[in-house]
Image: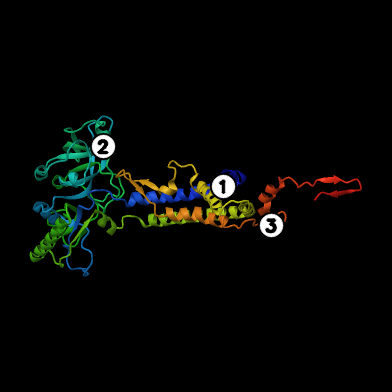
Amino acid sequence: MALRSFRRDKALTALMVFAIALGIGACMTTLTVFHVLSGDPIPGKSDRLFYVQLDPADMNDFTPGEEPSEQVSRYDAETLLREKRGMRQSMMTGGGVSITPDREGLPPFVSDARYATADFFPMFDVPLLYGNGWSAKEDEAHARVAVISKTLNERVFGGGNSVGKQLRIDQADFTVVGVINEWRPTPRFYDMYSERYGALEDVFLPFSTSRDLDMGRNGSMDCWGDSDGDATSVNAPCVWIQYWVELDSPAKAAEYRDYLNNYSDQQRTAGRYKRPTNVRLRNVMEFLEFNRFVPNDVVMQLWLGFGFLLVCFINTVGLLLAKFLRRGSEIGVRRALGASRGAIFTQSYIEAGAISTGRRHPRPGLVAAGPVGRAPATGQLCRTGAPDLGMLVLTFVLPSSPASSRRPAAGLAGDAGHPGDPAQEPVTRMWSGARPATHAHRNTGSGTSPAP
C-alpha cells in the first residue's frame, strides 16, 4: 500500500526524497571537512608526544599568568637535547633549499626543507619507503646526509631506490639515506608556526648541518634583545625552534614537567631568565586545541550544514503530514472496516521510512548508520550518529502518529466534508466502485409492491 501511495503522488515523493538527500549531502560535506581538519593527526601516539614551552624573555611587556613563548631558543633546545630526559626528543625548524638535480633537462629548483634531529623519524612514525633516518652520531658529526620525500625522489631520481646517491643541496653534496613514503599528517602538527595544512617538506636535514652551512630558514621568530647580527646563533635572545619530547606514561610526563620547572629555576639563577618560572607541556591534541587549529569559518559551515539538514527534515515532515492527513477519510474507512491503529501506523511508518532511506546512495541506510568520513592522514573511519535518533523520530514517528489516530469512519456521513473536497477523493473512489443495492419485485396481479 505504501508503494501504491508513492505512485499516486510521484512528484511529492520525489520532492521529499530530494530534500532529504540535499540536506544530508550538505551536512556530510561540512562534517567531512571538519573531521579532516580536526582529527587526530597521529592516532595512537598523540597522548605520548608533548610540545615544550619555556619563558626565557626579559621583563618588558611581562604580564603575570600569560602564556610563555610559543617556541624555544636554540640554547635551550640544545641543552634539553643533550640532557635527554625523555624517551625521545627532537628539535626542529623549517627552511628552504635549492636543489640542483644531476638529471639532464631538469633545471635547479627550490624546495621546502625541515632541519631536525635524529629522533624526528621514529618519534613521529614517519613511514620510510627506502632506507632509514640518520642517527644521533650523525647529528653530532654534522654529517651531510638527507632524507627526501617520495615526490622529490620521483622528480630527481625517477622513483627508484635512491639510497646512497648524491643530491646537491645549496651548493653542497648530500648522501640520501632514506626516502619517505606517502605521509601527510593533517594538520601538520609538529610545526604550527608555518603552513598548517601545507604539503610535506621535500628535504629533511640534520639541524647541526643546516647551521654549519647557514641554510635559509622560514617560520616565525621572536627576539627581545641584541643578537649581534645572527638571530640563529646559540646565544641569540630569540625563540624560533620547535621542541618535542616523547614520554610513555602520565607519570613520566609529570616528572618531565618538574624537570622543566627546575631547569627554568636554574636558568633564572644563572641570570639568563628574568621572568618567573612559567612552563607548558601539552600533548598533541591539547596543543592543537590551544592553537585553535580549526578555522572559525569551518566551524560556522558545520553549524550551517546541520541547520540546513534540520530545515530539510522539517520540510519533509510537513509534506508527509499533509500527505497523510489528506488521506484521512480513506484511513477512517479502513479503520471502520477493521484495520487496527497498529496496521495504519505501520503503513505510514514504512512509507515515511522508505522516503527517508530510499534515495540512491553508495552506503545504504546512511540515516541509521550516521555520516561517515575518512581522514586521509590516518585511514580511519569516523562516524557521527548523534543526530540520527532524533531525525528518525522526527521523520518517521511524527507523521505516522496523527494518521493512526484517525477514528473509525471519520470523514463519512456528517464528517465527510464538502463535495469536491480533495481530501475525500480516496473515499469517493473507494465507494464509487460499490454495486448499488437491488430490490426484488413481486407481481401480485392486482398491482406491484416491493418485496419486504
Q: Residue at x 66, y 49 (%)?
A: 426
Q: Residue furthest top?
A: 104
Q: Judging from the image, what secondary structure is the residue with disc 1 in?
A: helix
**Marks 2 and 1 in Cβ contact (< 8 Å):** no
Q: Residue furthest left?
A: 270
Query: Going from the N terminus, do you reach mark 3 or mark 1 first?
Result: 1
Q: Residue at x 35, y 55 (%)?
A: 295
Give the mark toward the camera: 2 or 1.
1
- Which labelled disc corresponds to residue 150? 2
In front of the other: 247 or 170: 247
Q: Judging from the image, what secondary structure is the residue with disc 3 in?
A: loop
Q: Which quadrant would the N terminus be assigned to in this image?
A: top right
Locate residue 360, reporting x and y percent: 48, 42
Q: Amino acid at mark 1?
A: Thr
- The alpha-carbon separation of the residues under discs 2 and 3 comes to 77 Å
Locate residue 175, reporting x and y percent: 16, 36
Q: Amino acid at mark 3?
A: Ala
Q: Is residue 333 visible?
A: yes
Residue tagged 1: 13
Q: Amino acid at mark 2?
A: Lys
Locate residue 278, reporting x and y percent: 17, 64
Locate residue 393, reporting x and y percent: 47, 55
Horizontal relation, residue 270 to residue 395: left or right: left
- Which labelled disc corresponds to residue 416? 3
